[in-house]
Amino acid sequence: MPRRFMIAGTLTGGVLLSVLNWLTAALLPPRFKQFRDPGAVVEAIRSNVSGNDIYTAPQGLFMAVSLRPSSAAGPQNFGARVVRQFTTEFVVASGHPFPLPAFSDSQG
């Protein structure tokens, strides 16, 4: 009984958080601004990075880069991205495959 309750609670919580995330994204104004010339920015980034990674600059720029060869053809299929996101969330919610170290509150 407790295991079934935990699974049902985890799945319900995951779906509820996803719905709330989509709801707040639809109601609140966008948090990100668009570049004035996105094509120039993409070309400048492509010419200055060696591949997919996280990059920083001393001027305070912090950026994650994911270059796809198909990005010139347009954005990926939105439905496939949502399915992949839900699958990832449910796999994570179902449990961690590796045992986590136990931490003790005692200072012994």
Image (cartoon, helix red, strand yellow):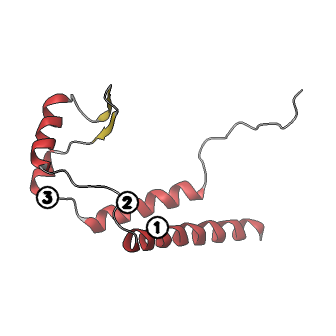
Q: Are marks 2 and 3 in contact (CB under 8 Å)?
A: no
Whichever of callouts 3 and 1 sits on the residue coming sooner in the sequence is: 1
Residue lying at 31% horizontally and 29% vertically, measured from the top left: 59
Disc 2 residue crowd, few under 14, some 14–19, many 20+, Cα 10 Å: few
Indicate the position of residue 56 as horizontal and vertical percent values.
33, 30
Q: Is residue 74 left or right of residue 105?
A: left
The disc at residue 84 is 2
Q: Amino acid at mark 2?
A: Arg
Label 3, label 1: how far apart the Cα atoms are: 25 Å
Q: Is 92 rendered above or below residue 1?
A: above
Q: Are marks 3 and 1 in contact (CB under 8 Å)?
A: no
Q: Amino acid at mark 3?
A: Gly
Quadrant in the picture for residue 8:
bottom right
Residue lying at 77% horizontally and 71% vertically, measured from the top left: 1
Query: Which residue position holds label 1?
Result: 21
Label 2, label 1: how far apart the Cα atoms are: 16 Å
Q: Is residue 84 left or right of residue 7?
A: left
Q: Which one is nearer the viewer's eye here, 21 or 92?
A: 21
